[in-house]
Image (tube, rainbow, N blue to C red):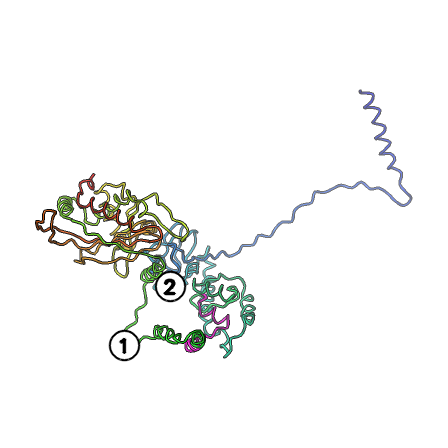
Amino acid sequence: MMASLQSRVPALSSFSSSLSPSPPGLHWRRCIAFTARPRRRIATVEAKIREIFMPALSSTMTEGKIVSWIKSEGDVLSKGESVVVVESDKADMDVETFYDGILAAIVVAEGEVAPVGAPIGLLAETEEEIAEAKAKAATSSSQSATPPATALPPPSPQPPPVAAAPPPAAKVQTDGLRKVVVTPYAKKLAKQHKVDINSTIGTGPFGRITPADIEAAAGIVPSKSTHVATVAPATAAVTAPAPGLTAPKAAATKFPEIPGSTVVPFTTMQAAVSKNMVESLSVPTFRAGYPVTTDALDALYEKVKPKGVTMTALLAKAAAMTLAQHPIVNATCKDGKSFTYNSSINIGVAVAINGGLITPVLQDADKLDLYLLSKKWKELVEKARAKQLQPREYNSGTFTLSNLGMFGVDRFDAILPPGQGAIMAVGASKPTVVVDADGFFSVKRKMLVNVTADHRIIYGADLAAFLQTFSKIVENPEDLTM
């Protein structure tokens, strides 16, 4: 084996020697290979100016109002520290910073409104960057104020085709990348008229794209009189009575002005309530009422009232125990194609607060005893009136209870909240003359309960059975304290 290995060595040497002869004029030089050193990168320090955005504090929030700035310009901030208080559509909540730095500039002042995702403040890393951040804030505010003056070209008498919108597109592209903020209705109009949102200039606050911007980009004349004039001939050509149909629409857009009247804009909460109420009109509902004898419940209330139990807690507990026996009334239909049996019984109770209406939620009300339920309810009411409810404390309800009996209202109908299957309206308990099976008269206290239900998933027989069970629990309330 060694011999065979040694025999191979000359072969290698002969191979190397065969390279030794060099042609005339060509000389081999020993070369030393140097390891290539990587180029040293020149360290560049870039200014880090971060934006504080308007957060989405609830699933229905589209814009927020600055209640107050906890920190002032120039204050040093630490990660996780509260910076500003924002009023959402349900509550006032503290907004924290995700970075360390200096609050260099406040873009949206107290009392002003900004859409979700819009910058409301600028955060600088060092003091040297504060001036640059202030300049950036001034530039952004001036840009948001100028679009209305240089908005879109005036509409022509004849609507131009959609293809006539490229000139604004070129202007937008030269401005660089920007965050497009669009109202939901404007987005719907853009899809309907095939308008590119990215090539549309917004004239709303902070460059927000409004329905008027989409109509202008699509070449639709925004004149109300023109709209009515174009609709009337089309309807008249179909049937003779059609012109009468346009009259209510024209009348709905014009209301007589009362001298000395004052227009008050909706608060964020009032706007959310208005939106939810309009959304509720799209759900097919029906109503059922049931008289409930409350003598036994009133007697129990007098016993537990000194222990801090409220009538609202008693009614919520009775409703939760009833829902446990009738889960279909606790179900939810959200897409019109299916429904969901909710695993938890969360009772939302309507509470009127200053400037709006909110429904704090008693979660798992069927699993809590009456005294713990009452304690939890008092905490929720205090947080609601202070506008400090967390989202899950007002948007997780599966059934709602509205009680106006404390105000002497004997009966009323409640509007079904979006995303729920039923809502119960409770009237006042009043002395009522009744006749028993033997024909004898007596006086008993009764209250009228009306339930509004989603007819897509809850039928008349379901609701009738629910009301019968609720009546039995209220008329024999011993189980409420167990």
**Figure quadrant of the C terminus:** top left
Count of number-bearing discs: 2
Indicate left or right for 8 with 97 as reference.
Answer: right
Amino acid residing under circle 1:
Ile
Which quarter of the picture shows residue 266? bottom left
Q: Judge whether residue 226 is colored magenta.
A: yes
Q: Earlier in the sequence, mark 2 or mark 1?
A: 2
Mark seen at residue 258: 1
Query: Magenta span has 167?
Result: no
Q: Percent from the top left, x then y, of residue 324?
A: 28, 42
Image location (x, y in percent) of residue 419: 35, 53
**Residue drawn 83% across and 20% down?**
3
Q: Residues within 10 Å of mark 2 (few under 14, many from 20)?
A: many
Which residue range is magenta in the image?
Answer: 208-229
Residue 48 on image: x %, y %: 49, 56
Question: In the rendered view, would you say 205 is above or below 379?
Answer: below
- Residue at (26, 41) in percent of width and height: 368
In the figure, 91 relative to 17: above or below? below
Q: Which mark is residue 272?
A: none
Marks 2 and 1 close (CB-CB < 8 Å):
no
Query: Is 226 in front, or is 257?
Result: 226
Residue at the spot of label 2: 113
Q: Secondary structure at mark 2?
A: strand
> Looking at the image, which residue is at 9% across and 47% down?
438
Relative to 452, is 234 on the left or the right? right
Under mark 2, the amino acid is Val
Question: Which of 110 and 367 lies nearest the eye of the viewer?
Answer: 367
